[in-house]
Amino acid sequence: MVSSWLFLVPWLLGADDPAPKPDLTPLVRAKMLMALLALTVLGIGLVAAVILGGWMVRRLARQPVSPSRVVDDAWYAKPLVPQPPDELDEHDLG
């Protein structure tokens, strides 16, 4: 796969090679070069973003964790289903 793409770079740069090449206008050739350049810059940018992101994560991992807030966990001691009252009020009957 790579070897089939090797002829593309000298062809885009306009080098004389014995391989037959399609006749392209300078505008189309410039567009192809800019697309190749854009893909290269995008790839390098993505690699740089991964490296910088990993550097930031390692830097964050070196810092100690701050203490967490104390939360009152007494909610579990309460019954989930309320107990029926011993005496019913008159207004509850309807």
Image: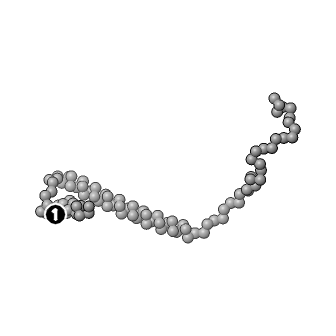
The reply to whether residue 9 is in sight is no
Question: In the image, what residue type sits under mark 1?
Answer: Ala
Instruction: Answer left or right for 44 relative to 21.
Output: right
Q: Residue at x 74, y 53 (%)?
A: 76
Looking at the image, is 71 positioned above or below residue 64?
Answer: above
Residue tagged by mark 1? 15
Name the spot of residue 13 as percent of width and height, x first. 20, 61
**Quadrant of the drawing holding the N terminus:** bottom left
Q: Secondary structure at mark 1?
A: loop
Instruction: Answer left or right for 93 relative to 5.
Output: right
Mark 1 crowdedness (10 Å alpha carbons): few <14, some 14-19, many ≥20: few
The quarter holding residue 85 reads: top right
Looking at the image, is 28 positioned above or below residue 14?
Answer: above
The quarter holding residue 41 reads: bottom left
The quarter holding residue 72 reads: bottom right
> Which sits in the foreground, 2 or 32?
2
**Quadrant of the drawing holding the C terminus:** top right
User: Looking at this rendering, what residue extends furthest in the left direction?
Assistant: 18
Looking at the image, is 22 positioned above or below residue 57?
Answer: above
